């Protein structure tokens, strides 16, 4: 499971988000330009938490693809 910086549409901010696929499945999805969902846990001021889940946009998928191909991911 890769972790990437992504823009959370719910928080309206950049966050560190985890992909919801194994690394092999993630590479296949990126190669096929399929939907890639990510999530992060949002903790509110009252310490309540919720999972924010969304799909990456095309530029974010391209950035993730480059990161994985660089050998760092």
Image: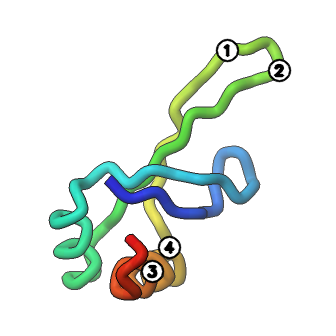
Q: In front: mark 4 or mark 3?
A: 3
Residue placed most toward the observer, 38 or 34: 38
Mark 1 surroundings within 10 Å by alpha-carbon count, few (fewer than 14), some (14 through 19), many (20 or more): few
Give the image quarter of residue 65. Answer: bottom left
Q: Name the residue under label 3.
A: 67
Q: What quarter of the picture does the C terminus occupy?
A: bottom left
Q: Where is residue 34 in the image (x, y as percent from the top left)?
A: 26, 73
Residue placed most toward the observer, 57 or 4: 4
Q: Mark 4 points at which residue?
A: 57
**Marks 3 and 1 in Cβ contact (< 8 Å):** no
Q: Position of residue 70 (x, y in %)?
A: 40, 87
Cα distance between the residues tagged 4 and 3: 15 Å
Q: Mark 2 points at which residue?
A: 45
Secondary structure, mark 1, is loop
Q: In front: mark 2 or mark 3?
A: 3
Q: Mark 1 points at which residue?
A: 48
Horizontally, is 37 left or right of 9 in the view?
left
- Asked if residue 26 is positioned above or below residue 64 in the image, the reply reads above
Question: Of marks 3 and 1, which one's residue comes earlier in the chain?
Answer: 1
Q: In front: mark 1 or mark 4?
A: 1
Q: Position of residue 72 (x, y in %)?
A: 42, 75
Q: In front: mark 3 or mark 1?
A: 3
Q: Residue at x 52, y 76 (%)?
A: 60
Cα distance between the residues tagged 3 and 1: 32 Å
**Marks 4 and 3 in Cβ contact (< 8 Å):** no
**Marks 1 and 2 in Cβ contact (< 8 Å):** no
Cα distance between the residues tagged 1 and 4: 28 Å
Secondary structure, mark 3, is helix
């Amino acid at each position: 499971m890769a972790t990437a910086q992504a823009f959370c549409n719910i928080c309206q901010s950049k966050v560190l988000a985890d992909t919801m696929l194994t690394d092999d499945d993630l590479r296949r999805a990126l190669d096929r330009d399929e939907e890639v969902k990510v999530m992060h846990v949002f903790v509110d001021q009252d310490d309540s938490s919720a999972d924010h889940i969304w799909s990456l946009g095309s530029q974010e998928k391209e950035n993730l693809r480059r990161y994985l191909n660089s050998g760092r991911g």
